[in-house]
Image (spheres, grey):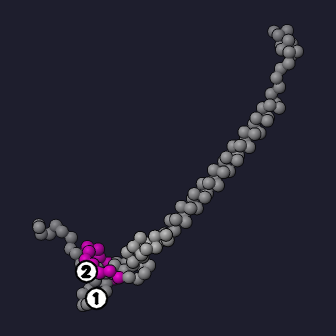
């Protein structure tokens, strides 16, 4: 291995913010907070989800973990889009109904008498 090209690794403690479970490891990640474990200084890195809180690893796969309200925002967008779609469809159907009725009532078919008058005027 060439010297001086690889990043420096340090002992790290990953803390799951949901369950407060701690995992010790070695990483290139650094942080300002440190914790002494067995006389060794470890950088403390907070993680939002780990194997201790992830539904796949905890056996609670039917539950959804939504840390940033992404699921709620998505369902809100979908419901708003569906409402807009329903409103657009209703407006389009009403416009179709009113336009066909107005065309029938406003557009009179010329009678034979009217056609004869037009021919005589020419």
Q: Nearer the viewer, residue 48 or 119?
A: 48
Q: Quadrant of the N terminus?
A: bottom left
Give coordinates of residue 85: x percent, y percent: 63, 50
Asked whether residue 66 is drawn in magenta, I would say no
Q: Is residue 83 left or right of residue 61?
A: right
Q: Residue at x 64, y 55 (%)?
A: 83
Looking at this rendering, what residue extends furthest in the left direction?
2
The residue identified by callout 1 is 37
Rendered image: mark on residue 11: 2
Q: Badge 2: how crowded within 10 Å, few (<14), some, or many (20+)?
A: some
Rendered image: mark on residue 116: none
Q: Quadrant of the C terminus?
A: top right
Give coordinates of residue 7: x percent, y percent: 21, 70
Give coordinates of residue 60: x percent, y percent: 46, 73
Q: Badge 1: how crowded within 10 Å, few (<14), some, or many (20+)?
A: few
Q: Nearer the viewer, residue 122 or 67?
A: 67
Looking at this rendering, what residue extends furthest in the front direction?
59
Looking at this rendering, what residue extends furthest in the bottom direction?
39
Give coordinates of residue 17: x percent, y percent: 42, 79
Residue 37 seen: yes
Q: Residue at x 71, y 43 (%)?
A: 93
Residue 32 seen: no
**31 vs 77: above or below:** below
Q: Residue at x 25, y 90 (%)?
A: 38
> Which segment did they paint magenta?
22-33
Q: Secondary structure at mark 2?
A: strand
Q: Is residue 112 left or right of residue 23?
A: right
Q: Earlier in the sequence, mark 2 or mark 1?
A: 2
């Amino acid at each position: 291995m060439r010297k001086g090209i690889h990043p420096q690794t340090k002992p790290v403690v990953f803390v799951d913010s949901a369950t407060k479970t701690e995992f010790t490891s070695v990483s290139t990640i650094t942080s300002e907070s440190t914790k002494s474990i067995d006389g060794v200084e470890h950088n403390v890195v907070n993680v939002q989800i780990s194997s201790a809180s992830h539904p796949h690893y905890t056996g609670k796969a039917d539950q959804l973990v939504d840390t940033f309200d992404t699921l709620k925002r998505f369902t809100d967008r979908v419901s708003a889009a569906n409402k807009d779609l329903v409103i657009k469809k209703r407006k389009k159907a009403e416009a179709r109904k009113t336009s066909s009725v107005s065309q029938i009532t406003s557009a009179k078919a010329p009678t034979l008498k009217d056609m004869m008058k037009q021919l005589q005027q020419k």
